[in-house]
Image (cartoon, rainbow, N blue to C red):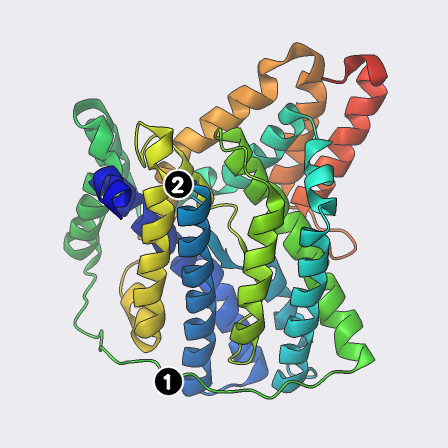
Amino acid sequence: MSRFLKDLSLPAIVAGFLAVLVSYSGPLAILFQAGASAGISDEMMTSWVWAISMGAAVSGIILSIWLKAPVVTAWSAPGTALLVALFPELSLNEAVGAYITAAVIIFIIGVSGTFDTFVRAIPKGIAAGMMAGILFQFGVGAFTAIETTPALAIGMLLSYVVFRRLFPKYTLVLLLIAGVILAVVLEGASLSGVRWSIAVPQFIAPEWNLGSTLSLAIPLVLVSLTGQFLPGMAILQGAGYPVRAKPIIGVTSLVSLPMAFFGGITTVVAAITAAICTGKDAHEDPSRRYVAGVFNGVFYLVGGLFAGTIVSLFTSLPAAFVAVLAGLALLGAIAGNLFAALEDVSHREASLITFIVTASGMSLFGLSSAFWGVVIGYGCYLVLNGSAGRK
């Protein structure tokens, strides 16, 4: 505890909060689409948000303190997207059974060490190209928002540049404050409709059958490993944290089991939001950035407690506010990954291909562009370099 208090810093706390803010804005919207497809009640939707928040909170706090690294966890956003097409034919009980099956399979893969071997086999440039491609869309989103809300987007962009020039250590803190003020003044955003209420989890009895296992559990394992754990581990290792996947996958999958009974989809290591907590904006000293991971979990705890309130809170702010905030907050991570992807001349072309494929957002056979970016880029790497070009 004494070390934690010593390492405590405002930038780390804000980075943790921003990571939660981004998660509750984009990926959470997919969860609500799935809930609408299933035709669930507001009480059940609240339970879903409570479960995914608590799963991310508990696993993130434990792993960040244990590994002394900013391990940010979240729910499987690609997995959540699978639900939209499956409901209402798939029942809530069958979905919970599939969540549990997926968590068990992911746990076995993680503790066996198979995933660590897979990650080590991927060249640094390929992994960086994949991450740059994933983050690229968020960077683009910050500027496409100018089309719909020019005053807010341009105002936040100018604020970012000024704060980066004058107060580089607190850029994100000041940008967050400035963005809220601009949203209220320029877009008429109001928080008057927000109501505080404590979440009440709803228990869901699981059901298992072959159909739900093949249609949800197995695809959920694939998209979680390729779309979340793969880029998430790449971010951590690329930021200088040589953590193994074994403890991370083990803890997140174990936490996923009890949360599933309340509608919580698989807990995974975060990919997009992790970049916010692993960069210099979280702290100049990499050894003290784990505090951002801890507070990311703390803010998830708060979000889970007030899950019934979280939707009205974020719908009160313009969508452009979160889009611009996320995009500008990830500029440093985008630049760092692009540099790492193109740094080694012998790997440059394969890494560039990885970046383009991933940034395209393509999906094939239910697998994400992050997976195909690595597969295609690594294939090009082998052809272009052969065994002699491997590092």
Q: Position of residue 207 (x, y in %)?
A: 69, 86
| Image point (46%, 26%), residue name | 335
Q: Residues within 10 Å of mark 1 (few under 14, many from 20)?
A: some
User: Residue 293 vs residue 130: left or right?
Assistant: left
- The answer to whether residue 22 is above or below residue 286 is below
Residue at 84% from the left image edge and 17% from the top image edge: 387
Of residues 349 and 228, the one drawn nearer to the viewer in this rendering: 228
Q: How many numbered circles are shown?
A: 2
Sequence-wise, which precedes: disc 2 or disc 1? 1
Q: Amino acid at mark 2?
A: Ile
Residue that carries the numbered disc 2 in the rendered image: 276
Q: Secondary structure at mark 2?
A: helix
- Asked if one can make out residue 186 in the rendered structure from this viewpoint, the answer is yes
- Would you name the residue on which mark 1 appears? 200
Side (left or right) of 211 relative to 59 = right
Task: In the rendered view, tell whether residue 32 sits above or below residue 291.
Answer: below
Q: Mark 2 or mark 1: which is in front?
A: 1
Badge 2, how many Cα within 10 Å: few under 14, some, many 20+? many
Along the viewing direction, whichever of 360 and 345 lies nearer the viewer: 345
Rounded to the nearest angstrom, the CA distance separating label 2 from label 1 is: 31 Å
- On-image quarter of the C terminus: top right
Cβ–Cβ under 8 Å for marks 2 and 1: no
Judge whether 163 appears above or below 291 on screen.
Answer: above
Residue 12 location, quadrant: top left
Q: Secondary structure at mark 1?
A: loop
Q: Residue at x 62, y 79 (%)?
A: 96
Q: Nearer the viewer, residue 225 or 191?
A: 225
Could one spot residue 320 in this view of the protein?
A: no
